Amino acid sequence: PELQTERLLLRRMTMVDAEFYLKLFSDPEIVELTAFDPPNGIEGAKQELMEHCIRPFNENKGIRWGIVLKSKAELIGTVGYINWLKAKGHWAEIGYDLLAAYRRQGIMTEAMGEVMKYGFETMGLNRIEAFVNPVNIASIRLLQKLGFHQDGVLRERTHFHGRFIDDLCFSLLAKEFN
């Protein structure tokens, strides 16, 4: 499904987006804060795009939208649901990324609001979860602004480049969504 806000078009990711995917997920800040190594060149980007964006949609296990700024008609980020478990609790995990030049402009707040509305109203979610690196203060503030509550700390849940990293778990319930 295609979603729109005042400034944004949220559209399905396709293989045509491989170069953008490579650029976005090669950003050193995104690599560090998400604890995922960058794609291995354009072929690696195509493989990851298929695995993380296209296949989950085709298999009805998730939705990852490309965020397009209407005024420029170009991709600037991604947002969407992964680990969508319909039968057990009606919940999904949300993930989001934005090119550095577009951060701190309210873009992700706008995109997430529309995606959360779609999740609760159309997908029938009861709970949306987000996992955040504790040093990612901007992401923590975004989630708090959107009404998410911190459920706890998953101590040393992630292993990246020889070190263990805690994950903060945030959630928002359908009954809490405005």
Image (cartoon, helix red, strand yellow):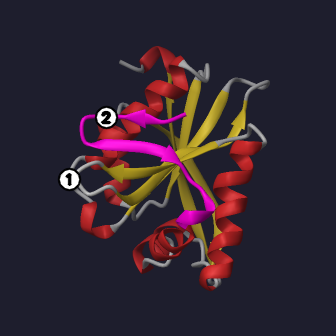
Expressed as whole percent of the image width and height from the top left, the position of residue 160 reads 62, 76
Whether residue 10 is in magenta: the answer is yes
| Secondary structure at numbered mark 2 | loop
Q: Is residue 10 above or below residue 176?
A: below
Q: Is residue 27 left or right of residue 61?
A: left
The secondary structure type at the circle numbered 1 is loop
Specify whether residue 132 is in view.
yes
Question: Residue beneath label 2, please?
Answer: 5
Foreground residue among 156 and 13: 13
Identify the image quadrant of the C terminus.
top left
The answer to whether 57 is drawn above or below residue 85 in the figure is: below
Reading the image, the residue beneath label 1 is 105
The residue lying toward the viewer, choosing from 28 and 54, is 54
Distance from label 2 to label 1 (Cα)? 14 Å
Residue ID at (37%, 34%): 4
Furthest residue toward top: 175
Which quadrant holds residue 93? top right
Answer yes or no: do the residues labelled 2 and 1 have beta carbons within 8 Å? no
Q: Which residues are magenta?
A: 1-17
x, y (%) of residue 119?
Answer: 54, 28
> Hey, what amino acid is under mark 1?
Gln
Closest to the observer: 30 or 173?
30
Residue 173 place in picture, x, y as percent: 51, 23
21 on left or right of 111: right
